């Protein structure tokens, strides 16, 4: 990682968790935690810190590993002969935590509560909106302020259902730089890195057909 990210106050050398020594399975006795960036930087079982004049070129970190194409690729295109960049801050994302996908509500239900979480790499989550009509209309969610820069932003919203039937609920987060989640991934790459399409859950109101 760049030295500036390594020196950030939230980049941690961790040797304890919940008042106890960090368990081996979590990377103990010492590990890095680099929030907002790919998990490949949060190395477990740390033995040394090495300042180098190049990007990581160790096992599993060369070629297309943890890299995105600089210019958009056509789906299915081999990315080995194109210019790539290493992944740094992660793109904005959100998830729906309730209701669960496939939930069924009694006939006549006209309002359901939806909640979830969002995060945005090095940036903040500016807003979250939810749609159940394919994006024709959006309902803004209420957000709980995060406890720190890298905490998940919890959100919730109450949706009105016009009638019984089948609905797909999409959640879209937008970061502090105005970048929002897409319906469809626009940055295709062979390893699927950086995909931040909107999360969707399906619900049905009424009896089974």
Image (cartoon, grey):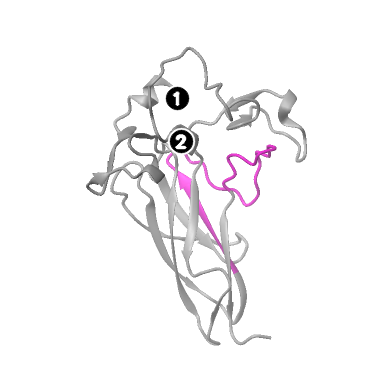
**Alpha carbons under labels 1 and 2: distance apart:** 9 Å
Residue 151 in the figure: left or right of residue 18: right
Task: Kindly indicate the quadrant of the structure image that contains residue 35.
Answer: top left
Label disc, if present, on residue 1 of the rendered structure:
1
Q: What segment is highlighted magenta in the picture?
A: 168-196
Image coordinates of residue 181 in percent, x first then y, are: 55, 48
Say which element carries label 1: loop
| Classed neighbour count for the residue bearing mark 1: other residues with Cα under 10 Å, few (<14), some (14–19), many (≥20) | some
Is residue 56 shown in magenta?
Answer: no
Give the side of residue 134 with respect to residue 11, left or right. Answer: right
Label whose residue precedes the other's in the sequence (1 or 2): 1
Task: Give the main secondary structure, helix, strand or loop, of the magenta stretch.
Answer: loop
Location of residue 113 by image quarter: bottom left
Q: Position of residue 112 (x, y in %)?
A: 47, 75
Q: Residue at x 52, y 20 (%)?
A: 55
Quick one: SS at disc 2? loop
Residue linked to disc 2: 37
- Proximity of marks 1 and 2: CB atoms separated by less than 8 Å: yes
Q: Position of residue 165 (x, y in %)?
A: 62, 79
Q: Is residue 207 above or below residue 5?
A: below
Foreground: 120 or 6?
Answer: 6
Residue at x 49%, y 53% (from the top left corner)? 94
């Amino acid at each position: 990682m760049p030295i500036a990210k390594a020196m950030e106050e939230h980049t941690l050398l961790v040797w304890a968790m919940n008042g106890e020594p960090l368990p081996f399975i979590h990377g103990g006795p010492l590990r890095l935690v680099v929030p907002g960036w790919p998990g490949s930087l949060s190395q477990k079982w740390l033995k040394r810190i090495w300042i180098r004049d190049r990007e990581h070129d160790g096992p599993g970190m060369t070629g297309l590993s943890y890299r995105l194409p600089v210019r958009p690729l056509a789906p299915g295109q081999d990315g080995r002969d194109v210019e790539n960049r290493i992944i740094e801050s992660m793109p904005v994302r959100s998830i729906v935590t309730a209701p669960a996908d496939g939930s069924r509500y009694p006939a006549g239900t006209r309002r359901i509560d939806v909640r979830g979480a969002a995060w945005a790499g090095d940036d903040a989550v500016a807003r979250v909106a939810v749609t159940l009509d394919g994006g024709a209309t959006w309902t803004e969610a209420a957000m709980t302020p995060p406890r720190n820069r890298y905490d998940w932003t919890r959100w919730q919203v109450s949706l009105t259902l016009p009638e019984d039937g089948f609905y797909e609920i999409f959640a879209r987060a937008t970061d502090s730089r105005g970048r929002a989640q897409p319906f469809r991934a626009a940055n295709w790459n062979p390893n699927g890195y950086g995909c931040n399409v909107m999360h969707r859950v399906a619900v049905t109101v009424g009896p089974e057909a």
